[in-house]
Image: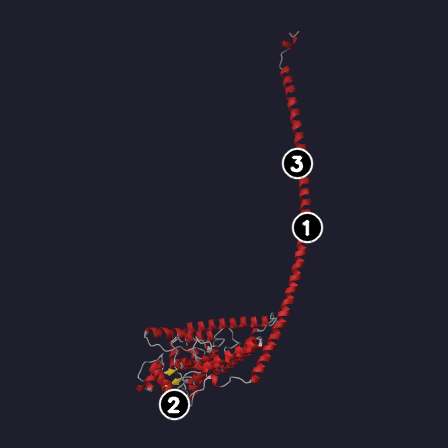
Amino acid sequence: MNLKPAWLLLLFISTAVRSVPIDRNGAEQDQKQEAQEENMDTGLYYDRYLREVIEVLETDPHFREKLQTANTEDIKNGRLSKELDLVGHHVRTRLDELKRQEVSRLRMLLKAKLDSANTQSLQMDHASLLKQFEHLDPHNQNTFEAKDLELLISTATKDLENYDAERHEEFKRYEMLKEHERREYLKGLDQEKREKEEKRLQELKEKHRQHPKVNAPGSVAQLREVWEETDGLDPKEFNPKTFFKLHDTNEDGVLDEQELEALFTKELEKVYDPKNEEDDMMEMEEERLRMREHVMKNVDLNKDRLVSLEEFLKSTEKKEFSNPKEWETLDAKPMYTEEELQRFEAKLRDKEEELKRKAEALRQEQELLRERGKALEAQKKEYQQKCPRDRKTSRKLARDSSLLVRTDSCSFNHKHTNLKRSRLLLKPKTTCLQNLLKISPYTLRAAP
């Protein structure tokens, strides 16, 4: 997906992406660039929906043409959204489908949230609840209209502008949690082991601070170092315009945030090594974010989170480009105060107590289920004890009934047999009488 500068403004696409060193090996570089674009994530909870909408819109020739000629204000003030009425029917159909899928996903999220809070949701008003999501029109849940595009652009712009601040806060919480766990770990040790461990941790901290000087990001010294060590060029022949074109990896005429962060890799490698116990890679990414913000603050004149060639060349004319202030790394000063740490630990204790209460409630529920299981098992055994007598009685009744049937049958058969025998006994007598009647009178008279 080769996004144009204006569309990059909408997305701020590389805000949450970790940069990698630049590798200039033709096809291999292109493959890496494509892989990075596929794996980009804005960090927004509607990131997938945002990307799919962009991909569908870019398939329309008319909208793509308008996008290429749009400027920052056209996107921010919503004028670009009006072009949606002119896109093809198949594009609108696909956008409608994407919106219905997103509404369905949000409904599932709402249901899961309400279920987790033990809230009765049988009569839940989805339309009202969907209003809390600002990136689409909740009143129309079936079709994607110009208002949906306008809301998507404005919400993404606002959310991504606040994303860096949220990342700083998240890192601050991470550092306080690390310190809290360190203190808790030391509390569990005896005096001798605690002193030994504290000494070891302090040595690691000092070792981390012993690193080469870090050049100020965006300064001539820092850029020349990249020119020499990454690009393999003579530092004496450093040319800002050539440097810009070399590091505009997607050749879109601007340096986006990902391309800028890639420039800081050499500086970060001076301080952080993933093989060293004392170096924290989370801190390295926070340092990278600070460097990028520093450059954007000094170079990005129109605040569109992109550095054009004109802005880049103007920055090289400033005094700070040649004589910058010394760059202070994260270890130069603490990220939080002791009061902030105490408040953080208090919140941790509150959460721990809440988890204990929930665990106790679950334990009681489990015990209740166990008792019910025992009662059911007792009923089952009682039933099994009664069932053999019931089956024995049933078998006896069936046997008696069968015997009665057999007895009646035998009686009937016996009577029938006697009747047949009587008929057989009578039959010879009848035959003799018939034979006697056939004797002639002469025979009778001749008889003595």
Quadrant where the C terminus sits is: top right
Residue 137 place in picture, x, y as percent: 51, 77
Q: Amino acid at mark 1?
A: Gln
Badge 2 density bin: few <14, some 14–19, many ≥20, Cα 10 Å: many
Residue drawn at (64%, 17%), measured in percent from left and top?
Answer: 432
Badge 1 density bin: few <14, some 14–19, many ≥20, Cα 10 Å: few
Q: Is residue 51 left or right of residue 187?
A: left
Q: Nearer the viewer, mark 1 or mark 2?
A: 2
Q: Foreground residue, 175 or 297?
A: 175
Q: Which residue is mark 1?
A: 385
Quadrant where the N terminus sits is: bottom left
Residue drawn at (33%, 82%), measured in percent from left and top?
Answer: 228
Task: Say which quarter of the image contains residue 30.
Answer: bottom left
Q: Nearer the viewer, mark 2 or mark 3?
A: 2
Q: Which mark is residue 321?
A: 2
Q: Which of disc 2 and disc 1 is earlier in sequence?
A: 2
Q: Which residue is mark 3?
A: 406
Q: Which of disc 3 and disc 1 is earlier in sequence?
A: 1
Q: Amino acid at mark 3?
A: Arg
Q: Amino acid at mark 2?
A: Phe
